Amino acid sequence: MKKRRKIYLSIFLCLILFPYTALCNDTMSDIEKSIKKTLELSKSIDNEINNYLKIENRKNKNANNSKKKIKKTETHRKTLIKNSGTSQPDKISANKEQIKKSDINASAILNLDQAIEKALEASLKIKSAQEKTKALDALFFSQKTKFLPSVSGSYKYSYNDEARTGENLKEQSGLSATVSQPIFTGFLLKNQYKMADYALKSAEFSLKLIKDGVILDAKEKYFSILKAEKLYSVAKDTVEQITSHKNVAENFYNVGMVPLNDFLKSEVRLANAKQQLIRAENNLEIAKLIFNTLLRRQANTPVILSDIENYTPFNPDFNYCLKNANQNRIELKIADIGIKTAVSSVKLAEGGFYPSASINGNFYKTGKDWNMRQTAGIDTNRWDITALASWKLFDWGKTYFERKEKKHYVKIAENQKKELEDQILIEVKSYFLKVKETEINIKTSGKAVEQAKENFRINKEQYKEQMATSTDVLDAQTLLTETMTNYYNALYDFSISKSRLEKAMGL
């Protein structure tokens, strides 16, 4: 009301001054034009005041109803939790322009845990890794059976056009069965069994590693959408704020209270803000598309996520993070298995230096026709046991060079593990510093947001009183946009960096 009184006082002074100027010029037409111009000014200012009061009333109404809305949202959230069996104290963030409230249901709202679960279920990488694990598990059991005896059998039937001398048989059949048991194979079977076991364990660790990667990917996509939504909201508010200022500047320019460049500045800033809004909207759509692709859903599936605006400070120091990484990183365990596999391959090659031994048991049965009937006066059933030993004494150094080759692969595996340790050190340090950086930025930009809002409000009010220029208002608005953008970038980059650090630590 005080502002309205000041404006009416200004109008009253204008009504006095304009006629006075006109009288000085002794031109009644100028008086009429001045009065008409003053009335237009009064009408435009009154309209602007009404618009301003409507905005303020709307803000007050929203503030008064905020508790009711929060209570209603919480009641709706509890209902969804009761129906879906989940409990996550998060806020619901949705793109209301693209998704109608009637389309929102319990199954469409995802919190972080649900998003991770769906990503794990939908991942083709995980399914492929599971199939590979099953294949290597079958290979492991196949290798294990080589320690056990094997049984083989054969049947033979022959027909002669003439009876053989001494046997007088045109038809003859034979049946044989053999049981073979390896006794010593130069540690061949043992090392093949070890290598199959190592391959299976490596596949199991690789499966766990892929799952961790999918979890991290789901977290990154989740927080990226939340950040894109906030930046879209900031860009939208920026357009609305500059539009409101442009209208004020246009009214002031129409009545000659400000120069043309004030109005043109606001026009240019508004055009730039609209471009930023389009970019923010596109970034949001792309983030949702990537998220739906990760969950293997339709590209246009609505994405409604539970917001996480509160952050938990990260307290562990760097040494603690590095210690956990060296103990828990799956890549290091896979590297250890790789070294063991290379060592086993050396021993496998050395098997050529040793002899091999086995025992075979054979049973034979012959007959005079296809159904194995016995020949008169001849015992056709017999068996034997054979012990067989063999040793390759000279092969021109073939075994020696094969062993030498495998030893070099052991060195390669050891060097790869050292490289991996250096890489883990760099990853942990980088993500640790990024977490600390974003955590500090959250605190500093959080305070700056309130200051930037107040600065923009003051400049906007001063401009309406012609105590500030249009440049001051636009600069204050730009500062507010940058501060809000920095805050949301810091907030969600902290969550992303923390997730990456946890994966680097093997947690």
Image (cartoon, rainbow, N blue to C red):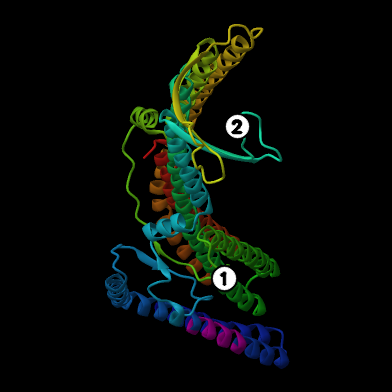
Rate crowding at label 2 as few (under 14), some (14 to 19) or many (20 or more) other CA atoms within 10 Å.
few
Image quarter in which the N terminus is found:
bottom left
User: Quadrant location of residue 359?
Assistant: top left
Residue nearest the observer in this picture, 264 or 463: 264
Q: Give the mark, 2 or 1, whose residue is nearer the N terminus.
A: 2
Q: Residue at x 68, y 65 (%)?
A: 268
- Any mark on residue 300, and which? 1
Q: Is residue 94 above or below residue 161?
A: below
Does the magenta portion include 300? no
Q: Which residues are magenta?
A: 39-50
Q: Is residue 421 above or below residue 372?
A: above
Question: Tag 2: residue type?
Answer: Glu
- Residue 118 in view (yes/no): yes
Image quarter in which the C terminus is found:
top left
Camera-side mark, 2 or 1? 2
User: Quadrant location of residue 24?
Assistant: bottom right
- Any mark on residue 167, and which? 2
